[in-house]
Image (cartoon, rainbow, N blue to C red):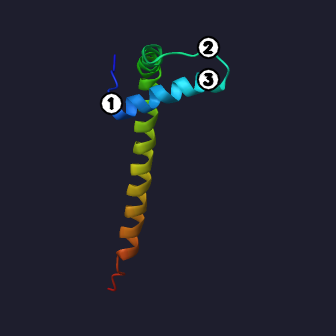
Amino acid sequence: MISIKLPRDQKEELIQGIQEYFEKEGLEAIGNLQAESLLEFFLQEAGPYVYNRAVEDARRAVLERMQAIEDDLYTLQRPVHR
């Protein structure tokens, strides 16, 4: 299984966001450890889907750019007169 590692500052920001979400939604407040466990769960479960989607989006963007480059190269061709 793919393990997504985040820099500590990003992880702390996400943990705080989870805690704020629980508070905003009127749910039972959770501590850092609970929020971190929830984050780890979602990274493990949803992370591969999100990662694969990002890879697919990047692949599509590269292919589109390659097609644009190919089109640009065709416009650079000069007619050959015989």
Q: Position of residue 19 (x, y in %)?
A: 53, 23
In the image, 8 versus 71, the foreground residue is: 8
Q: Amino acid at mark 1?
A: Arg
* Residue at mark 3 to residue at mark 1: CA–CA distance: 23 Å
In the image, 39 versus 59, the foreground residue is: 39
Q: Amino acid at mark 2?
A: Glu
> Between tags 1 and 2, which lies in front?
2
Q: Could you tell me which quadrant the C terminus lies in?
A: bottom left
Q: Residues within 10 Å of mark 3 (few under 14, many from 20)?
A: few
In the image, 7 versus 41, the foreground residue is: 7
Please state if 76 lies on the left or on the right of 42 as rendered: left
Q: Could you tell me which quadrant the N terminus lies in?
A: top left
In the image, 62 versus 41, the foreground residue is: 41
Q: Do labels 3 and 2 touch, CB within 8 Å?
A: no
Q: Residue at x 35, y 80 (%)?
A: 78
Against 63, is 76 above or below? below
> Which label number is shown at residue 23?
3
Residue occupied by mark 1: 8
Q: Position of residue 7 (x, y in %)?
A: 32, 32
Q: Do labels 1 and 2 touch, CB within 8 Å?
A: no
Label whose residue precedes the other's in the sequence (3 or 1): 1
Q: Position of residue 71 (x, y in %)?
A: 42, 65
Against 79, is 20 above or below? above
> Which label number is shown at residue 28?
2
Q: Residues within 10 Å of mark 2 (few under 14, many from 20)?
A: few
Q: Residue at x 44, y 15 (%)?
A: 41
Q: Secondary structure at mark 2?
A: loop
